[in-house]
Image (tube, rainbow, N blue to C red):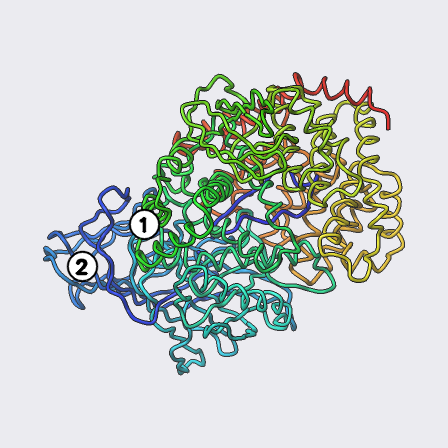
Amino acid sequence: MRPFPLLSTSLLAVAAALTLSGGAPAAAQPAARAPAAPQVPSQLPRGVRPLHYWIAATPDAANLRFTGRVEIDIEVLQATDTITLNAVDMTFSRVTLDGGTQGRAAMNEEAQTATLRFPLTIRPGRHRLAIDYAGKIYTQAAGLFALDYAGAGGQKRALFTQFEAPDARRFFPGWDEPNFRTPYDLSVTIPAGQQAIGNMPEARRTRNPDGTVTVTFRTTPAMSSYLLFLAVGELDRITTRAAGVEIGVVTRRGAGEQGRWALQSSARIVPWYNQYFGTPYPLPKLDNVAGPGTSQFFGAMENWGAIFSFENILLVDPAITTEARRQSIFKVAAHEIAHQWFGDLVTMAWWDDLWLNEGFASWMATKATAALHPEWEPLLDRIDGREQAIQLDSLRTTHPVVQRLTTVEQISQAFDAITYRKGEAVITMLEDYVGETAWRDGVRAYIRRHRLGNTVTDDLWREIERAAGRPVTAIAHDFTLRPGVPLIRVTGARCVGGRTQVSLAQGQFSRDNPDTPGRWRVPVIASTGAAPARALVENGAATSNVPGCGTLVVNYGQTGYYRTLYAPPLLAAITRNYARLRPLDQIGLLADNWSLGLAGYQDADLALNLARAAPANANSRLLVRMANILGQISDMYAEDPAHRAMLARFAFARLEPAMRRLSWSARAGEPANDAVLRNELIETLGVLGHPATLAEANRRFAANDPSVTAGPLRSTILAIVAFNADEATWERLRRMARDERSPVVRVQLYQLLGAVKDERLARRALELALTDEVGATNSSQIVSAVAAGHPDLAFDFALRNRQRVEAFVDASSRSRFFAQLAGGSADPAMIDKLNDYATRYMTAQSRGAVDRSIASIRDRIRVRRDRLPQISRWLEAWRS
Ligand SMILES: [Zn+2]
């Protein structure tokens, strides 16, 4: 899956909410794999395993329910009179074995299972189990769910499925664990005039006497339950062909052309992956299906042959889609398509190794984007991912990349920045360590050996090591089996005979436990501007002999997952020569030094010296990172308007030159990233209260300028206006939201109503979230938008209305939702409130999200108390 894409590019978005995604069948029907290896934890007994499913569903969309029949070929391994499988929220009307013997079902809601009891002993061997049942259609994205939208001729309802992580059990009774791979035959009965999309192409359709149509899809290859997919509705489908595969984009009727960019992008990505993986895409077709709505926790899902994406990250409406969004549509498609191999063709045996799916797909998406769209400079964005990961990984509440997961809540919480972003960072580092070609050869061998099978992480290391011809597993284990962030101290550098002798010492970077003595084997690259030198820091120390005597940069190229702390004279040299370093290193150095200063490893103001030293024509990603840091400082001054004003003066001085160069209008033929930067700068300046920017945004909004309703600046202008809104403006935005027909714009406008600075209006937005006006999937977005600026307000409100709020959050994500609302608080009282919430509503195994929010609140309080004064003194002394 792909995390939920943030509404705003910079300051308005505080909490990075993350979510899940999923695969395609092969031409030949492979035999089902042997049952899981014994070390795979499981919630189901291992005495019976499924071999093949035939599922027939008849949705009753109007009444949000469906009836189904599933027939399952099973293999009984030990004689038994009971069979336990997964099932949630369903009733069984008839259970039969081998076409005759009737069984009784006992549901266990807590364990999400059904136990079928038969009046005889089932002998080992093959049997056929059949269950007639009825289930629910949800209004949040879990199981079979409905999305309502305004279509031609009135309100429409389309149905989709979302099964990762453990929600296939809401659609059919079965063995809902990734290691049970089987073929699936799916059919669905739908009203005439509607279409259905599954993982595989349609095999046949039959017209029923009542006018309905039954669509049957071709048999899938053996795959995991979480990758099964179904969509039903009034749909358009546009197609093309690439590398012998039919590529499609599926939308609500009338929106098909908006899928053209995603279609063209997918048609370039599939052949590139065929080449990289060395195994061709294995299904006859690949669709990407657009859902008109949102989820709090995910943006897209890699169902095999039928990717699902919410419209805002799949469709391009030329009137409203920004350049940044166009780029992210490509990157999300690249992520989900990478999963078609890494995740779908080869699947982790259990959720403990989820990172193998998500870290790899994230890394691969960046790699494919760098190859196909180098002008977007996607490698510079890897530092954002590294920073998100370190943010979580530098607190005690972190977890290893590979972790032990047993409960549904734990699995849901595992879709976080450690799994995605640290996973990507570790792969980036290891690829760099073994070399691009050896890494690719190892990946090819891994895919070849394990296709249509399930793996654990060490299966990958084994192939990489073999391809590289050198040990890599020990380093990989250090970074995946133990939590935390290494710190590399550059303790000294001496120029001797035209080379620099560098002394390195290794510790641990931690924001709340600085004395932890973690040990890693860390591959380090250093350069003085001449050829880079490599060293492996083992047992806590190393020396490196680096060619040249220029400005020393450690973690040169920023591929390492660690923080670098320079001795003061070395950082002073970097600061002097900062403007001449490569953008990648400028961005990485700024991020490192900002974070080291806040954590207390060095003075907090040293990063501001770097920000001051950045060149006037700085790379756009450096300006964005700088804007992000300045925005964080501004937030810290919530109670200190005098210093906030000083900060704003410094920020304006650093950002205005770029803004003058870019202006409010695109130049013909300008680089794509200029368009991205323009929006980000305008929004940052607008949120920081830059008078000219605010005035221009407000003028355009008041005059109903065309740029407010269409064009590249639309969402940026609206974000500034909404953030600074008074009551009349807020009401006008609300009317715009209510009257809006595009599902994408509608949810944006409702989010903006929550992203308002004025606390009284933020309260009104919360009340609005509970009404029918906003639509079932938009409510949680409003509450989260309020939480970004007013975490305490949003959490208190959600708790007061707990049951109503839970109703609009995906069932498996509720334990995260409440905790994340409060995560941006700086109020010590919130710690007790969160503890109290966890005691009341969470089990000991599922309170991880609450503990992480508490840790970041404590850290925020510490930073404001201990680190901010230094920044204040720096700002008092700064003169432009
Ligand atoms: Zn994913």
Total tally of numbered discs in the picture: 2
Q: Which residue in the protein does label 1 denote?
A: 455
Residue at (51%, 28%) from the top-left corner? 544
Residue 188 screen position, x and y as percent: 40, 71
Going by the numbered disc 2, the residue's amino acid type is Glu
Residue at (84%, 38%) from the top-left corner? 690
Q: Is residue 643 above or below residue 739?
A: above
112 relative to 119 in the view: left or right: right
Nearer to us of marks 2 and 1 is 1
Q: CA distance from mark 2 to mark 1?
A: 22 Å
Most foreground residue, 401 or 128? 401
Residue 545 screen position, x and y as percent: 52, 29
703 relative to 485 in the view: left or right: right
Q: Which residue in the protein does label 2 denote?
A: 75
Residue 118 screen position, x and y as percent: 16, 56
Going by the numbered disc 1, the residue's amino acid type is Thr
